[in-house]
Image: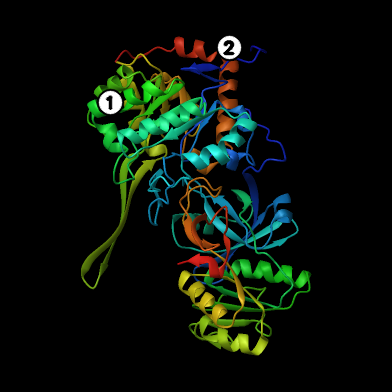
Amino acid sequence: MDMVNLKLTDTKKHPITAEIIDNLPLSEDIYKIILNGQDIAQKAIPGQFISILCKDLVLRRPFSIANVDGDYIHIIYKVKGEGTKYISQLKSGNTVDFIGPFGNGFNITSEKALLIGAGVGVAPMIFLAEELKRKQIPYILAAGFQQKVNIAELNPADDYIVTEDGSSNYAGRVVDYLEEIINTHNPQKIYSCGPTPVLKFVVDIADKYNIMSELALERKFACGTGVCMGCTIQIRENNEIKNRRICKDGPVFDGRSIIW
Amino acid sequence: MVTVKPDLSLNIGKLKLKNPIITASGTFGYADEYEEFMSIQNIGAIVTKGITLDPRDGNPQPRIAEVKSGMLNSIGLENVGICSFIEHKLPILKERNINFILNIAGFSLEEYAQLAVICEKSEIPAIELNVSCPNVKAGCLEFGKDQETLYRLVSSVREVYSNTLIVKLSPNVSNPIEIALAVQKAGADAVSAINTVKGMQVNPIINNGKLEHSYIKGGYSGPAIKPIALSYIHEIKQVLDIPIIGMGGISNVDDVLEFIAVGSVAVQIGTANFTNPCISEQLAKDLENVLMQHNIMSLQDLIEGNKNANNR
C-alpha cells in the first residue's frame, strides 16, 4: 500500500534517515561511524546518546555520541552482537535510521576535570573533552583499551592512553594509573564512562580523594524514552533508595548516589 | 477519491475514541513521556503502564532481551502505585485532554476490587484489568487462567466500577473460549487480546567441557507473536458479542487491517512504539488514508463490510 508520509512538526523528535559519511575500523572490533545528523548534531551535548535502528531488529541500539562536527555526529562502537555487526557493514553513502539525542548529558562545571574512559566508554569522554576545550576548562584525559585503538582525537603527548597489551605510552589498565594521575594533576571533578568494574573503582578512588564524580551508565533497554522500565538502577537520594531509569533520568549520575 | 475525511471514531463501552489506534500498556508510560515525539491527541487512546495498589520496584536485572522478531520483557510491574498516579499523572492526562485507559493489576481478588473503587471515585474513564502478566510470582496470570476465578474477579470489579471495563486476556491458557465467555458474562465492556506470550532466551556456553547457561524468562512480544494473536482473536470472536481490542506485533497499517479482519474493533500498538516512538500517530494517519483511497466512509463501514473470502 502506498502511504502518504505523515508530516511531523519540527518541534517533535522523530527518526531521521541519515547519510553515512564514513564508517571505519579503529581496531579489530572497534569502529567509528560518522552520520549526517543535520540539526540534531548541534543540539547534542556530551553524555547524550542516539538510538540506531538496525535493519530488521525490533529494538534500537543506543550509542553515546563521541563527537559532533558541524552537522556530523561521530559514534565509536564495539562490534558485539547482531546490531553492531549490521552497523559495521554499512558503507559511506548508505543511510541509517536514528533518533535522538536522548538522555541528560554531563553537568559541565568549571572545576579542573579528570576524564576516564575505558573501552568504548572513551567515546563520550572525547566529546566532553572537546566541550571543555571550547569552554577553556582544564582537564586530563585517561583512556584505557585492551589493545591499540586509532582514535585521532587522543593525543599521546597530553592524554594518558593505557593499553593492556602495552602498545601505547602506558601499559596495563587505566585504573592502575588513577591515583598517580590524581596526585600529579589534582583534579576537582571526575567524569567517567566504561564497564561497571571500572566505574566502581573510579567511585572508590573519587571517594578516597573526596572528588565529585559523574558517570555515564549503560544497560539494555527497549525504548530509550523512559517507558519500558528495562534499564532501571537504584540510586540513593536524600537517604532514600529510588529506582531511576538510565535512559531518561540518566545516563549520567552522581557516582556517590549509585547502588551497584 | 472522497475528499471528506472518513469517520474513524468508535465507542468502547462509554469511552469514545476518535480512531481505533490505542497504545498498549507498558509501552507508552503515562503518555507524558511521548509528548516530545507526537501529538497524543491524534490517536484513539493510550493504556497506562500497569498500576498496582502499592508502588512496586519490579524485577531484578536483566529485564529485556531481543529475540527473533521480537523481545522478551520481565519488568515485574514496576510502577508508582495508584495513589501517586492519581496525584501526579492523572492531572497531566486530564489537562492535556488525553483519552486514557488505566491498566490495573492486583495480587488478590480484593485488591482488584479495591483498585476499581479508587478508579470509580477518581472518575477514571476506562480500566483494563491485567489478569495476564506473566512476570510476577503471585497474582495476575493466575487469575486469568481459570474461568471461574476470573468470573468472580471481573464481577466484583463490575459491581463497583461503572465506566468502561476492559479485560486483557492471556494467550498462555488452554481454554481461551471459556475464559472469554466468563469475562463477557461477568459484565466486561470489552476484551483486549493478546498479552505477551511466555518465552525464554537461553545463553549456553561450554566451559572446561561442561555445559553452563544463563537465561532470561519473560513475556514475548513483537512481530513474531502476530500469528498467535490473530488466531486467538479469530477463535474468541466466534463466541463473543462484546468488542475485541486486538494486539500482538502490529507495526504497520496492513497489520491493523489484519486484526480488524479477524474481528477486532480497535487495536493496540505495543513493541512497535519502541522501534519508532512516532508509530501510533503514523498508523492513525495511514488508516485514514487507506479508507480514503478506497472510498470507505467510516471505520464502521470497514468493519461491517468485512467478509471471509475463502470460506474456510
Q: Is residue A144 above or below residue A36?
A: below
Which quarter of the picture shows residue A179? Answer: bottom right
Q: Nearer the viewer, residue B25 or A131?
A: B25
Dot in front, 2 or 1? 1
Decide if residue B257 is on the left or right side of residue A100.
left
Relative image position of residue B189 (x, y in whole percent): 40, 19
Chosen colour scheme: rainbow
Decide if residue B296 is on the left or right side of residue B259.
right
Say which quadrant the C terminus of chain B sits in. Answer: top left
Secondary structure beneath label 2? loop
- Whole-Å distance between the Cαs marked 2 and 1? 45 Å
Q: Which residue is mark 1?
A: B152
Q: Nearer the viewer, residue B52 or A30?
A: B52
Which quarter of the picture shows residue A192? Answer: bottom right
Identify the mark nearer the N-term, 2 or 1.
Answer: 1
Any part of residue B130 in sight: no
Q: Residues within 10 Å of mark 2 (few under 14, many from 20)?
A: some
Any part of residue A226 in sight: yes
Q: Label 2 amino acid?
A: Asn
Relative image position of residue B228 (x, y in whole percent): 33, 32
Mark 2 touching mark 1, by CB under 8 A?
no
Relative image position of residue B268 (x, y in whole percent): 47, 30
**Residue found 45% across the figure and 51% down from its top:** A230
Q: Which residue is mark 2?
A: B295
Q: How many marks?
A: 2
